[in-house]
Image (cartoon, rainbow, N blue to C red):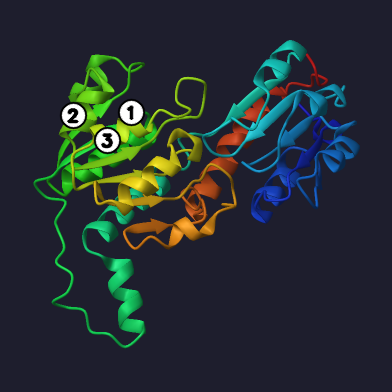
């Protein structure tokens, strides 16, 4: 049956990768790419669109939805959908889709890489060497092997982190109240029944949760103080999961040996002075930014769009 892709109009946010835009144009329909994340520009462009593809910066607010009478799908290449007003979408019958499986390895590998960089003082010693200082005897590192690695959030990313950490001979425990016991057992991971239990036992804690009312501020000042003295914290999930002020205090006073952040309460961060703390490694939200993740996300979203829009069935949009 002839595909009806000519009927489908797609709006892509400014930061959607060019190759993803090209594939959407080739396989789904006509594409318009925004030049900023400004809500006014989004509203002007979305009025005749059927699909809106966004990453983390563009906000799909109730106001945007109100100006999109033909919108059928909001597609998010990646995991988090906290920038999308899902209630407004649900009320309008607009489907929200994402591709959490696409970037699992990319985010997990960055998480483990950051942990190793923290334990081995990679960033600090690299910076010193570039300044001409040979700091070989000044910094003694630690190994992942033999450490307790606590994983908060046992979805696709958390499970991949567990696999890599186990390969490095860490003892892995995980906390996720929404995952069944057998999922932990299948990965050979001990289940922590309480977050406090995980924080108190872990030498390394990595965060892999979505942002919602239950996880915002999950790692509070009180939670950070429950972590082992000399522990490490890695956040590659969402910035608002962690009380950053409390984290910076714990790094400054030595309660934590180090932390790594790929995400922040405000992006870009407004207070960059705190990012100069020596035992903090920071990256600009690059967890899912790999060629492989973008390729995977593109094909996953295309397949989902084809099913939702019923391409190839000869059905008009909305049926």
Taking the image as drawn, is residue 285 in sight? yes
Residue bearing the label numbered 2: 189
Residue shown at the point (71%, 22%) measured from the top left? 310
Q: How busy is the neighbourhood of tag 1: few (under 14 within 10 Å), some, or many (20 plus)? A: many
Q: How busy is the neighbourhood of tag 3: few (under 14 within 10 Å), some, or many (20 plus)? A: some
Q: How busy is the neighbourhood of tag 2: few (under 14 within 10 Å), some, or many (20 plus)? A: many
The kind of secondary structure element at disc 3 is: helix
Rendered location of residue 307, percent (x, y)? 65, 24
Taking the image as drawn, is residue 108 in sight? no
Residue 311: quarter of image: top right
Residue shown at the point (61%, 41%) measured from the top left? 56
For the residues labelled 2 and 1, the Cα–Cα distance comes to: 10 Å
Dot placed on the residue nearer the N-terminal end, 2 or 1? 1
Badge 2 vs badge 1, beta-carbon distance below 8 Å:
yes
The kind of secondary structure element at disc 2 is: loop
- In the foreground, 167 or 279: 279
Rendered location of residue 277, percent (x, y)? 38, 60
Residue shown at the point (31%, 44%) measured from the top left? 233
- In the foreground, 55 or 4: 55
Dot placed on the residue nearer the N-terminal end, 1 or 3? 1
- In the foreground, 34 or 140: 140
Residue 207: quarter of image: top left
Residue bearing the label numbered 1: 154
Q: Is residue 199 above or below residue 192?
A: below
Q: Is residue 292 above or below residue 92?
A: below
Q: Nearer the viewer, mark 1 or mark 3?
A: 3
Judge left or right: residue 109 versus residue 212. left
């Amino acid at each position: 049956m002839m595909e009806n892709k000519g009927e489908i109009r797609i709006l892509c946010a400014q930061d959607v990768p060019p190759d993803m835009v090209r594939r959407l144009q080739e396989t789904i329909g006509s594409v318009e790419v925004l030049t900023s994340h400004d809500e006014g520009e989004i509203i002007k462009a979305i009025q005749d669109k059927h699909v809106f593809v966004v990453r983390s910066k563009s906000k799909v607010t109730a106001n945007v939805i109100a100006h999109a009478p033909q919108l059928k799908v909001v597609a998010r290449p990646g995991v988090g959908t906290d920038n999308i007003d899902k209630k407004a979408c649900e009320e309008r019958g607009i489907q929200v889709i994402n591709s959490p499986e696409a970037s699992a390895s990319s985010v997990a590998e960055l998480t483990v890489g950051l942990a190793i960089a923290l334990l081995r003082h990679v960033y600090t010693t690299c910076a010193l060497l570039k300044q001409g200082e040979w700091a070989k005897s000044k910094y003694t590192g630690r190994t992942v092997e033999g450490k307790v690695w606590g994983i908060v959030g046992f979805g696709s990313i958390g499970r991949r982190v567990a696999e890599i950490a186990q390969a490095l001979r860490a003892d892995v425990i995980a906390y996720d109240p929404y995952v069944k016991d057998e999922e932990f057992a299948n990965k050979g991971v001990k289940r922590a029944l309480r977050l406090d239990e995980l924080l108190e036992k872990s030498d390394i804690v990595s965060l892999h949760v979505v942002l919602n009312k239950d996880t915002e501020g999950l790692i509070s000042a009180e939670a950070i103080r429950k972590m082992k003295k000399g522990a490490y914290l890695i956040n590659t999930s969402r910035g608002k999961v962690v009380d950053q002020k409390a984290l910076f205090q714990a790094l400054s006073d030595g309660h934590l040996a180090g932390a790594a952040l790929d995400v922040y309460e405000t992006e870009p961060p407004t207070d960059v002075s705190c990012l100069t703390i020596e035992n903090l490694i920071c990256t600009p939200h690059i967890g899912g930014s790999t060629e492989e993740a973008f390729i995977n996300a593109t094909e996953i979203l295309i397949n989902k769009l084809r099913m939702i829009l019923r391409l190839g069935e000869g059905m008009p949009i909305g049926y």
